[in-house]
Amino acid sequence: MRDNAGKIKASREKLGEDLEKMKFRLWPSQANFILARPPVGDARFLYYELRDRGILVRYWDRPGLDDKIRITVGTEEQNLALLEALKGSLVTSGSDQRPVKEKRIGNMFPSSFFLVSVP
């Protein structure tokens, strides 16, 4: 069990470093997930973009959390799939990153989702 906990901790730290390089704001975590604010703050947009790419994260449409997503730490393969999907959802222009397009989809309240394996 300690070996597994050590692997999760190492994966969380690596994923956090990669997200910070993409200008995400992260909150400290000792769990198997990361709370992250996208570089432009439109977490709902990013939630739907990731969902459309087969990556499921948690989004809350609640004050204080509506600008953040919760990402469950996965395997190395799953984390790489997440990072590639994020790169596809963000346009890099110099050091500026912003959503590719603006998209609003109703007032849905998604239930709890987790990062899933993408073939």
Image: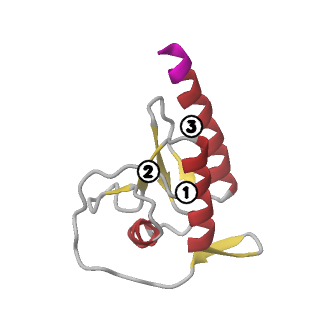
**Residue 106 within the segment the image draws in magenta:** no
Above or below: residue 72 compared with residue 100:
above
Give the mark nearer the N terminus: 3 vs 1: 3
Report which residue position mark 2 lands on. Answer: 115
Q: CA distance from mark 2 to mark 3?
A: 13 Å
Q: Secondary structure at mark 2?
A: loop
Q: Quadrant of residue 44?
A: bottom left
Say which residue appears at 44% left-offset and 64% top-offset.
54
The one of 101 and 5 positioned closer to us in this rendering: 5
Q: CA distance from mark 1 to mark 2?
A: 8 Å
Say which residue appears at 26% left-offset and 59% top-offset.
62
Residue 12 numbered mark, or none: 3
Report which residue position mark 1 lands on. Answer: 82
The x, y position of residue 76, in whole percent, is: 61, 42
Above or below: residue 11 compared with residue 114:
above
Extent of the magenta region: 1-5
Above or below: residue 35 compared with residue 100:
above
Q: Secondary structure at mark 1?
A: helix
Three-letter amino acid code of the residue under disc 1? Leu
Three-letter amino acid code of the residue under disc 2? Leu
Q: Is residue 24 left or right of residue 94?
A: left
Q: Quadrant of residue 47?
A: bottom left
Q: Quadrant of residue 40?
A: bottom right
Q: Residues within 10 Å of mark 2 (few under 14, many from 20)?
A: many
The x, y position of residue 42, in whole percent, is: 45, 70
Please tell me how many numbered marks the rendered image carries: 3
